[in-house]
Image: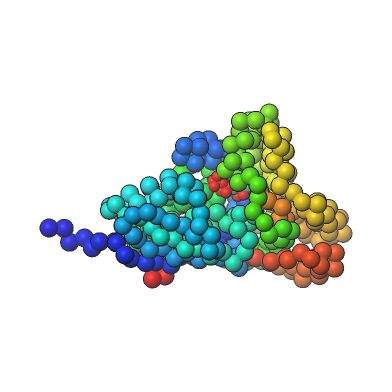
Amino acid sequence: MSTKKSLLHKTVIACAHPSLALTKYWGKASSKNNIPATSSLAITLSGLTSTTRISTVKKNSVVIVNGELQPPERYSQFFQHAGALCDENLAFKVESENDFPTGAGIASSSSGFAALACGIAKLADPDYPLGEISALARIGSGSAARSVFGGFTLLRAGSHAAEMLHDASFWPEFRIIVCIVKDAKKEYSSRLGMSLSKKTSPYFKSWVLDAEKTFKEACSALENKDIEKLGDLARISAYRMFGTMISSAPPLVYWEPQTIGLLKFIERLRINGIGAWETMDAGPQVKLICLKDDVHRIETALEEHFPDIQALACQPGEGASVSW
Ligand code: DP6
């Protein structure tokens, strides 16, 4: 007789933070298993959190994010893999809250799927290896594979799981200021956007080739804690990703008028000797890379020139965790 306890009607609460890419993942080597075509170097951001309550149920998985029922097809492949971990034919009731705008280019899918993967894996086995949790999270969202880990992470092109390069204490002065331009869901999800870029952008192949070079240079700039080099490379990676987005058909333009204003503003800060570099993702929000000593000056300048914009200063954060 089996002595294994059933996992039915168990509950766990998991938390994770978004992963902000310094060099970008944009495009899939395989869309079937959600394998990235480009290597990304990222930082897990403290201060922004997805908190997810997961209960095991007999059937009919449901996911509710910030009170809104999510389309089941977005989660079906993930739940197939997650269910297989539990050795039982289980379904999941998931209620998740983000304390930041959802689906608006602040990587809510990274923290959301990282929390979900971590919670389910730890329910199945409290010692489940982090690398395998990361591979499970990747099925849900490529960037979520990175959010499973804290600090500075990478997800290599063609790989199943992310890795942690350095924990959050490696560079405690490193800051990202997230500038929220518009708190609304984007028209094209990253997944759809990536598929459009791969199918239709004449520059997609060059983007993939070039991204590897930028990634490697950024990794060595990080090792040397060279903020100028890393900031420049992050900026280049984001703009080359935009080139691929904008050259897709239909063109993927995630920017709002204020986005451009902010990009120009950050350029001016740099010209005036303040260490600030811009990056963005699939949404209108602008993320500013800087060091702790410059945060106050940057926040003061932002308040003066963009009084309507909410700016959140984040530092390297911890990986996904659970509580019972
Ligand atoms: C622009 O991880 O959201 O933020 O794997 O299809 O769910 P899927 O995509 P997702 O894409 C993130 C794209 C990005 C860049 C990045 O975070 O590397």
| Residue 152 located left or right of residue 33 | right
> Residue 268 location in percent, x, y?
86, 56
At horizontal 65% and vertical 65% (from top left) the residue drawn is 314
Q: Residue furthest top?
A: 202
At horizontal 51% and vertical 54% (from top left) the residue drawn is 70
State which quadrant residue 245 falls in. top right
**Does residue 138 sit above or below 54 in this rendering?**
above
The answer to whether residue 212 is visible is no
Which quadrant would the C terminus be assigned to in this image? Answer: bottom left
> Residue 258 location in percent, x, y?
80, 55
Which quadrant would the N terminus be assigned to in this image? Answer: bottom left
> Residue 187 location in percent, x, y?
65, 47
Question: What's the image's color scheme?
Answer: rainbow
> Residue 56 location in percent, x, y?
35, 61
At horizontal 85% and vertical 68% (from top left) the residue drawn is 304
Q: Residue furthest left?
A: 1
At horizontal 53% and vertical 64% (from top left) the residue drawn is 67
| Residue 9 located left or right of residue 196 | left
